[in-house]
Amino acid sequence: MPSPAPASIERVTETQVPVRDVSDEALAASSAGPAVTARVTVIRPPARWPHLDLRELWHFRELLARLAWRDIAVRYKQTSIGVAWAILQPFLTMVVFTIVFGKFGNFPSKGLQYQIFSYSALLPWIYFSSSVSSSSSSLVSNRALVTKIYFPRVMLPLAGVTVPIVDFLLAFGILVGMWAWFDVWPTAAIVFAPLFLLMALVTALGVGLLFSAVNVRYRDVPYLIPFLLSLWMYFSGVVYALDKLAEWQQWVLALNPMTAVINGFQWGVVGTEPPQLGQTLVSVGAMTVMFVVGLTYFRRFEPKFADTI
Amino acid sequence: MANAISVEELSKSYKIGELQSAYGTLRDSMAAGARRIVRREHKPHYEEIWALRDVSFQLAEGGVLGVIGRNGAGKSTLLKILTRITTPTSGQAQIRGQVGSLLEVGTGFHPELTGRENVFLNGSVLGMKRKEIIRKFPEIVEFAGVEQFIDTPVKRYSSGMSVRLAFAVAAHLEPEVLLVDEVLAVGDAEFQRRCLGRMEDFSSSGRTVIFVSHQMQSVAQLCERVIWLDKGSVVEDGRSTEVVARYLQSGFGAGSSRVWPDLMAAPGDDLVRLRSVRVVQDGEEAAAVDVRRPVGIEIGFRVMRGGGPAIFPKLKLVDQRGNVAFNAMDTSPRWNDVTEPGDYLSTAWIPGNYLNEGLATVQVGVCSLRASKLRPHAGMNDAVSFHVQDPGEGDSARGLFTGQWQGVVRPLLDWTTEER
């Protein structure tokens, strides 16, 4: 290909490029070859209310792992303090909260030293808030992938809530140190901690699915998210313990799944009172609603992502 | 059914307003929604455009099909539907076998990651399994010729190196059906030759290929059969030599001039209507222009009534790959006030030694500004087109260099050199 393009119409017809000529028979045969038995992809207009194809998600599992791994690798390569950041962020937040809310505010802390109360609440909270922010921007920040290749788009918000788990595990190390320092020990209920963390994941995924899809059309979503999250934190029992609130207030706050996550997590890791079963069920219900709404909205607009993004 | 690909009445429509309101803000949209409720207005009616309309064809296993057509003819939409990046509005398609696509080499490359990491990332993005990538890894690295740098972040690669690596990954895909869009548009001549070679190997090994390109030479060389799309529909489907020849004779759809004898049928509204658009050089209409001399785009229009907003002529130039080369409008003060009714002929002069070689397509319009947004009154996409040619006499921006010269523009710059 010496020249970039036909410089003129005439020139091409003149130069007589090497042409792969075929006989008429071959051409006719090219629309009826031997039968093949292979995977058949059928492409149709999208259903109005598409379901989530779990088999397909499973088929693409390696891509999910690869995307999550990419985000982790890039994150720890790009930031100068790397791993330390995952620990410093919750730790410094805890220090500030302890001074502001613990010392000056004298906020309730379930009878624990404010430091360990705050840190054990910040761990699931920071996991949740980074999951929400990274999954909400996941479609737009992977524009090149969305417009160039096919894969279930759900992968992107899903990778967004997977990656912060690494930060969570790193920051958990500090909590182990705090157990010894403050002589506050986990109870057997720690076996439930992963379940409560899963609740945070599902909630974050629901919110992330919704906002990532909205973000495709509306570019002001990234400005909305930090604001939403900072409000949300004050209603989740991160800076103050919810057990001093009136009974009815606690029931209302149970609509926020993060209250159950934090209560349940603290129950295991720092041995506070177990979360109230009824309120936890309300939270599970709210989580389910958020997830279903987020997923439905996402799937509904998924066919348009590549066209609008 | 022995067809690898079978497409039946595939159509895709967009709503024009829908696309324009993309990138909007939630705030604006909510405000508009509230206004509609308060004033009891209906949702604005959007005009529908068909990117693809009732396209049907069958391709047998092992067939190599080329798809040609000018910008916006629906070629890329067709590929995007077949690769499932976007969905059709109606109709259906069936593909037998594993599908691989090369819509752009290097999709998903991340500059911070090393060559090795990017091979794995890009491989899985293109649908390879981990084991497959591990198996082909040495071959990929050798093909790209980047052995020494494989553990260096890609941001330190030269652009040639990263394109080679990206192509090496893509070239080692082994799907049963391969969909290719304009990959040959990147890289130097040597690289393009290798791409073509690889694709020939691919098709001779009995796999099915759909190949979309603007480059008629490679289409004719690679494909036995070609589909010519225009405005979303199939114009012709047949042997590549014949279809390509007729396509070239048709002058790529848009010619060097366009005249609307019937004013009422011309593009426009109650304020302005287009009358003619013409490409001129050296005082004559020209389909092929010399890169060294200025080219004029002549826009004739009629202002139908007085009292409208202040209007001005505008144009947009698109290169053969669909890149917008530039937008330009007449900023002279004569358009500051309301233009009197009558006929006007505006010519925009594109300087010599500015455009790159190849086909340029011009969109023209007569617009006004409202709330700092462009509002077209009369306009046309693909109004005219022309070929920019370099006679190669050494006095253009490429000097005596004869190889591929990348870029949307190719200006002749002023160079100064001092001896120090």
Image: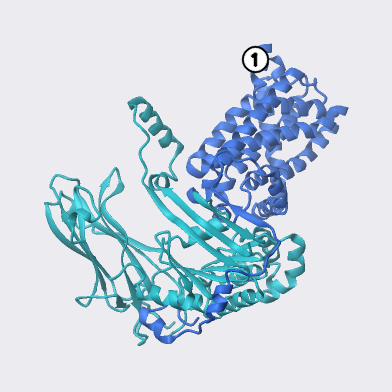
- As drawn, A76 above or below B260: above
In the displayed structure, does residue B382 sit left or right of residue A293?
left
In the displayed structure, does residue A193 sit left or right of residue B152?
right
- Nearest the eye: B109 or A12: A12
Q: Which chain is blue?
A: A
Is residue B363 in sight in this rendering?
yes
- As drawn, B60 above or below B112: below
Give the quadrant of residue A3. bottom left
- Nearest the eye: A243 or B328: B328
Q: Total label count?
A: 1
Q: Name the residue carrying label 1.
A: A249
Outermost residue on the right side: it is: A188
Residue drawn 60% across the image and 79% down it:
B197
Q: Which chain is cyan?
A: B
Residue drawn 13% across the image and 58% down it:
B343
Name the image colouring.
Answer: by chain
- Nearest the eye: B383 or A111: B383
In the displayed structure, does residue A226 sit left or right of residue B380?
right
Give neighbour class at mark 1: few <14, some 14-19, many 20+ (Cα, 10 Å).
few
Element marked by disc 1: helix
- Which quadrant: the N terminus of chain B? bottom right
Instruction: Please provide percent x and percent y for residue A17.
Output: 47, 84
Is residue A222 in sight in this rendering?
no
- The chain to which mark 1 is attached is A
Instruction: Please provide percent x and percent y for residue B178.
Output: 61, 66
Instruction: Please provide percent x and percent y for residue B385.
Output: 32, 69
In the displayed structure, does residue A121 sit left or right of residue B326?
right
- As drawn, A294 above or below A153: above
Instruction: Please provide percent x and percent y for residue A308.
Output: 48, 48
Q: Amino acid at mark 1?
A: Gln
Residue drawn 81% across the image and 33% down it:
A178
